[in-house]
Image (spheres, grey):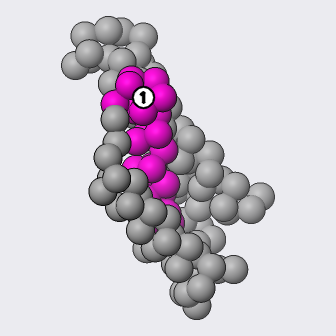
């Protein structure tokens, strides 16, 4: 399977785990707390699979960057957490960095 597809699954699992973390209310709610463990556990498992084919720096930078942007988007949509212009600009720079690493750089496995 394409390692970038697996990495996408890891990112989605992390987003699930982080959203569950917000909903767990300090781990005082059992079901969302279980979602944290399952989400992060599966995310790290999938992340480990991508490391068999892709460089660790590329994998971690992409996973972290897209996780940041995804969690911020979930915060806006699901939790009514606002973003200002500086936050949006910063996330645009993060996306530009991921593009450079994965598309323009010779260190990625494209």
Point 26% across, 16% down: residue: 25
**Residue ID at (40%, 16%):** 32
Relative to 82, say whether 107 is above or below.
below
Is 26 in front, or is 69? Answer: 69
Q: In this orientation, does residue 30 appear?
A: yes
Q: Is residue 25 left or right of residue 16?
A: left
The answer to if 75 sits in the magenta stretch is yes
Q: Is residue 57 left or right of residue 86?
A: right
Location of residue 27 in the rendering, given as x and y in whole percent from the top left corner = 26, 17
Give the image location of residue 110, x and y in percent. 69, 80
Q: In this view, does 9 lie to the left or right of 47?
A: right
Which residue sits at x=52%, y=78%? 101
Identify the residue at horizontal 53%, vertical 79% (top origin). 100
> Residue furthest toward the right?
1
Is-magenta flag for residue 60?
yes
Magenta segment: 59-81
Task: Return the residue at label 1.
Answer: 19
Give residue 71's position: percent from left, percent from top: 42, 40
What crowding class fits label 1: few (fewer than 14 Cα within 10 Å), some (14-19), or many (20 or more)?
many
């Amino acid at each position: 399977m394409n390692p970038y597809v697996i990495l996408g699954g890891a990112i989605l699992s992390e987003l699930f785990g982080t959203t569950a973390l917000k909903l767990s209310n300090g781990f005082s709610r059992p079901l969302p707390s279980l979602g944290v463990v399952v989400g992060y556990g599966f995310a790290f498992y999938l992340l480990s699979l991508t490391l068999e084919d892709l460089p660790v720096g590329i994998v971690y930078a992409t996973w972290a960057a897209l996780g940041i942007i995804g969690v911020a988007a979930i915060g806006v949509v699901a939790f009514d957490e606002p973003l200002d212009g500086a936050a949006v600009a910063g996330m645009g720079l993060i996306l530009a960095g991921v593009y450079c690493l994965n598309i323009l750089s010779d260190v990625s496995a494209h």
